Image (cartoon, helix red, strand yellow):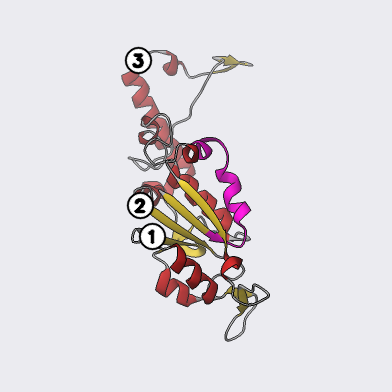
Amino acid sequence: MRIDIITLFPEIALAPLSESIIKRAQASEIVKIYAHNLRDWATDKHKKTDDYLCGGGQGMLLKPEPIFAAIAELTTTNSRTLLMTPQGKPFKQSMAQNFSKEKHLIILCGHYEGVDQRVIDELVDDEISIGDYVLTNGAIAAAVVSDAIIRLIPGALGDERSHQEESFTNPNLLEAPAYTKPINFKGLEVPEILLSGNHAKINTWKKQQAYQRTKQNRPDLLE
Ligand code: ADE
């Protein structure tokens, strides 16, 4: 997969993708990630990428011209273009799964009050929000979305099974509580069932715990 991120802050988008699992995925060419500065497509001498809102209102909006030029240059026959915006559809694990099958993602990052609507109408396939809060810029969201997508590409995580057993996957529940050693830590004990060696019973326990935790922390997932 190839990911092109278009942003005013390429370093912000790249920093979280430059360590650990995603770093290894890039080294083994499972994914190629490029972050581009939108300013490189600005045409005037001040490299202006934003302007005032038509009709008035506070703040600035990203102008259409540099974005149209950037996407025209980066688009191939296999491209899917995502816009990071708090006005988008809530990002879900199921979306990450779908996007992980794409050959080429272009991720456009909003800034200030967002982007000119003509960009959305003409160029954007999916508007994505990573949650009901407003970030200073979409490069942070682009890193979050890229990370969630890349780790699902076959080969990116060492152990392929780890996808099947994680939260929000099949069924859409949170994961059960987990414990490691020591078995007794300052009098706090690991539940005995996990030490029983009875895998059928352990699985039943995990399912019950996952359900309880989901009911408590994310009742919306059970509706
Ligand atoms: N840009 C600013 N806030 C955002 C959010 N919640 N999701 C995606 N992009 C954003």
At label 1, the amino acid type is Arg
Front residue of 154 and 71: 71
Residue 84 at x, y percent in the picture? 50, 61
Task: Tell whether label 3 touches label 1 (CB within 8 Å).
Answer: no
Query: Which residue bears the numbered disc 3?
Result: 198
Looking at the image, residue 66 lies above or below residue 173 = below
Q: Kindly state the secondary structure of the residue where label 2 is placed.
A: loop
Q: Main secondary structure of the magenta part?
A: helix
At label 3, the amino acid type is Asn
CA gap, disc 1 to disc 3? 46 Å
Magenta-drawn segment: 6-24
Query: Which residue bears the numbered disc 1?
Result: 80
Q: Is residue 20 magenta?
A: yes
CA gap, disc 2 to disc 3? 41 Å
Task: Tell whether label 2 touches label 1 (CB within 8 Å).
Answer: yes
At label 2, the amino acid type is Glu
Residue 26 at x, y percent in the picture? 49, 41
Tell me which numbered mark, 2 or 3, is placed earlier along the sequence. Answer: 2
Task: Tell whether label 3 touches label 2 (CB within 8 Å).
Answer: no
Query: Which residue bears the numbered disc 2?
Result: 102
